[in-house]
Image: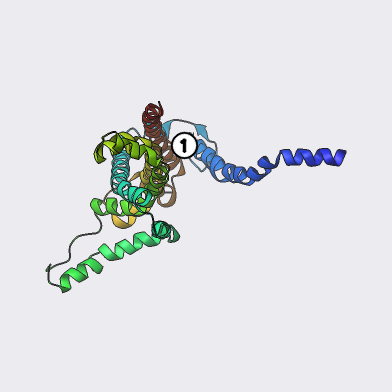
Amino acid sequence: MKKNGIKAALTKETPFFMIAPALIWQVLFFCVPFAIIVYLSFVKSSVGLVNPQVSLFYYLSLFDFSYMKIIARSLIFAIANTFFCLMFAYPVAYFLARKIKRFKNVFLFFLILPFWINMLVQIYAWFFILERNGLINTFLLKIGIINSPLHLANNMGTVLFVMIYCYMPFMIMPLYTALEKINERLIESSYDLGANGWQTFKNITLPLSLPGIKTGCFLVFVPSFGEFVIPALMGGSKNMFVGSLITHYFLVAQDANQGAAFTCFSGAILLSVIVLGNWYFSKKINVVRG
């Protein structure tokens, strides 16, 4: 009886034991480091952590135009990246979900293929393509279209272009999932009632794909805001971004306190934008669901 009781208890708690490794991982590699970052942002000490004093010194120093400019630049690039990814990804996702009947798995395979390659390798590939002596300039010089190499790398346009390339799959997949779930009978009913293609898309397809748009926008916007590899490799050192400045404080300047304060401050701004965006999308989705 006792063994049966223990076995029944263990069986009942199986879901907990299944999720325990992920929970431990989350606590050790997210919650604990995050708590340390928050602690460092409020501590002021002259020598390491000797005689620490709680202070808002590092936060008050962030209310400067240079910091606000960096955060604004990162927000603008994250919004622009999200917008262009949505504009380019939606037709691709629509084509895959609604138009392709045969070889769909083949197209999906090519869609997820970039995930097999490290993002750093992809960025370096674009650097060698766009640099002064890269593939594009070499080809244009050889066929005589240009007389001197074009300045394709180390500018903000290139940074945005590579960001769009790298984050496009993160937008396509949620959109594809949402579009594929749309009941074909709704589309047919819209046409039967006299609606044309644009009216059907505007009133049926687009509203029903809002959950996918919401997920895709968040998947692209959040990492884009803190991106530092692409700006560092493709933008040079001309313009600083949030991720670049955080990296500078922790790895170069060795100023963990200031870096922690800037991390928390920029993270709070990011969280505010996410909450606002979530409220907007939830409102639209609730209207669609009636």
- Specify whether residue 227 is in view: no
Count of picture labels = 1
Find residue 31 and report its image quarter.
top right
Q: Is residue 149 left or right of residue 82?
A: left
Report helix, strand or loop for mark 1. Answer: helix
Question: Looking at numbered disc 1 in the image, what kind of residue is underneath it?
Answer: Ser
In this view, the residue in front, 11 or 83, is 11
Is 229 rendered above or below residue 184? below
- Residue linked to disc 1: 41
In this view, the residue in front, 65 or 176, is 176
Q: Is residue 149 left or right of residue 77?
A: left
Q: Position of residue 199 (x, y in %)?
A: 26, 36
Q: Residue furthest bottom?
A: 142
Is 127 rendered above or below residue 12? below
Disc 1 crowd, CA 10 A, few/some/many (<14, 14-19, 20+): many
Instruction: Specify the quadrant that holds the N terminus.
Output: top right
- Specify whether residue 275 is in view: yes
Q: Residue furthest front?
A: 192
**Residue at left 35%, top 59%?**
123
Is 139 rendered above or below residue 118? below
**Residue at left 67%, top 40%?**
16
**Residue at left 33%, top 38%?**
206
Q: Position of residue 118 (x, y in %)?
A: 43, 60
Q: Position of residue 268 (x, y in %)?
A: 41, 33
Q: Position of residue 225 (x, y in %)?
A: 36, 43
Instruction: Specify the quadrant that holds the C terminus.
Output: top left
In this view, the residue in front, 223 or 265, is 223
